[in-house]
Amino acid sequence: MEIGNKISILYNDIIAISFIEDIISESKILIQSPYTYKEQASLYEGNKYNIIINSKDKIINALVYINSHKITNRRKFYILDILKSFKEENQKRKYERYFCNLPYKIHLLDENKEEQINVIIKDISLGGIRFLSNLEIDKNSNLKIKIFLDYDYFLANGKIIQIQSYPKANYKNQYRIKFDNIENEYLLKNYFEKLKIIT
């Protein structure tokens, strides 16, 4: 992590871009006010955000807390605390979780049909997946999720364990799916290893 590294800040289905202005300490950084392709984006003090830091040799995922902001020469900056609990939380998980903001087409299968839907995958592991979609899926549904990777596909049976709604967002529903069993898990591991996503 160095001054000038590009940062992607993820919330709802929006990606805002910023850069590291200064490294205050190992767990605190100063970033420029982020922007989207349309306009400047606002972060809110006291809120937590997932960010991706693009350094020279790797991509680093982190959970950050917006500590405060300051304005210098009419430019706005934010001070971010990188939460130590983020890594500790991941280490307690049974499966490694990969954070991303990946537009994707996944196939939902039930007993009667297979449906292809557009989603934004927010995070995924061998234990489950979290994605955004405009499709309304019944919470009691038993699902088979098929994700095509390279020349093969990753297949998992799962159940919806949480639904959150964002009425004003481009993708209005967020789903958390817990996998009961999976096939071709090596494809998922290989795919994210290629992207060098480190949690």
Image (cartoon, rainbow, N blue to C red):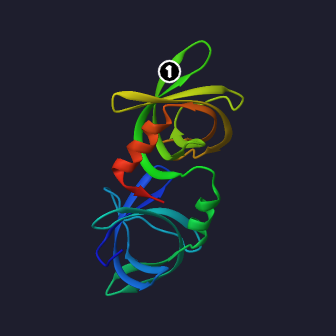
Above or below, comparing residue 118 to residue 30 in the picture? above
Q: Residue at x 48, y 60 (%)?
A: 199
* Residue at the disc numbered 1: 115
* Residue type, label 1: Glu
Q: Residue furthest front?
A: 186
Tell me where residue 119 appears, x and y as whole percent: 46, 37
Measuring from the top left, give residue 128's x and y in whole percent.
Answer: 59, 41
Percent position (x, y) of residue 143?
Answer: 62, 27
Q: In the image, what residue occupies the spot 34% across and 33% down?
A: 150
**Picture quarter with the N terminus:** bottom left
Work out which residue is located at the far right of the displayed protein and give it.
140
In the picture, measured across the screen, residue 79 lies left or right of residue 136, that is: left
Residue at 55% over, 14% down: 113
Residue 170 shows in this picture: no
Give percent across and percent down for residue 35: 35, 64
Q: Secondary structure at mark 1?
A: strand
The residue nearer to you, when weighing 86 against 18, is 86
* Res. 77 in view: yes
- Please name the residue shown 57% across and 32% down the image: 182
Is residue 118 or residue 186 the one in the foreground? 186
